[in-house]
Image (cartoon, rainbow, N blue to C red):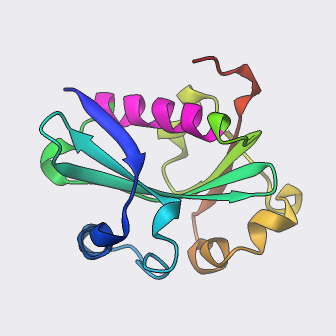
Amino acid sequence: MAISLRTAMPHETKQLTELIEQAGLQADGIQSGIRNYLVVENKEGMLIGTVGLELIEQDGLLRSFVMKKEYSSESLFLRLIQRILLYCKEKGAATLYLLTKADYLFEPLGFIVVPEDEAPAHITETAHYQVTTGEGILLLSCDLAHLSP
């Protein structure tokens, strides 16, 4: 399946909010930070997913990665994460962080678990980190230096 990844536009705020809320995730801050979201489209240009990305200092924080159910597959997920990693590196991020319960999905892509006491303050102080951390949630990081286009 051919897919593309691009920056979300203000007129897509409602559509992205609905997609994120349907997945049971917090959609707070989309309207004010729409340019922090990427849109995943199929070859026909239909929105099939989204991912939030905050660039903080030299790091990126991935949030709200959601795909429409009919487009969810492990192979597509892996391709998208690889594209997102390259996108973050192109934007100047040295490390990409994310919060998840499913660390096993990200470890093959070079992510490692970050112990809570080693988490950078500029990541732990974000609103996303504050509302997402809890029982079973792990902070993962991926060093982007090894990536090449």
- Give the residue at the far top of this rendering: 148
Task: Classify residue 17 as left or right of residue 43.
Answer: right
* Residue 30: quarter of image: bottom left
- Looking at this view, is 69 or 148 the one in front? 148
Task: Classify residue 111 as left or right of residue 57.
Answer: left
Please give the name of the residue rendered at 87% of the width and 62% of the height, measured from the top-left corner.
Answer: 117
Q: Position of residue 112 (x, y in %)?
A: 69, 39
- Looking at this view, is 37 or 21 the one in front? 37
Query: Is residue 61 highlighted in magenta?
Result: no
- Looking at this view, is 114 or 145 the one in front? 145
Please give the name of the residue rendered at 59% of the width and 80% of the height, measured from the top-left corner.
Answer: 131
Task: Classify residue 102 as left or right of residue 131.
Answer: left
Q: Is residue 136 visible?
A: yes
Magenta segment's dominant SS is: helix
Q: Position of residue 68 (x, y in %)?
A: 20, 54
Query: Is residue 87 highlighted in magenta?
Result: yes
Please give the name of the residue rendered at 85% of the width and 59% of the height, measured from the top-left corner.
Answer: 120
Q: Position of residue 17 (x, y in %)?
A: 31, 74
Exactly how many numbered labels are in the figure?
0
**Which part of the image, by quadrant, shows the N terminus?**
top left
Q: Position of residue 114 (x, y in %)?
A: 76, 50
* Residue 92: quarter of image: top right
Image vertical order of residue 56 relative to residue 110, above or below: below
Image vertical order of residue 100 relative to residue 146, above or below: below
- Looking at this view, is 10 or 118 the one in front? 10
Q: Is residue 23 visible?
A: no
Please give the name of the residue rendered at 58% of the width and 63% of the height, measured from the top-left corner.
Answer: 137
Q: Which residues are magenta?
A: 75-88
**Which part of the image, by quadrant, shows the C terminus?**
top right
Image vertical order of residue 54 relative to residue 42, above or below: below
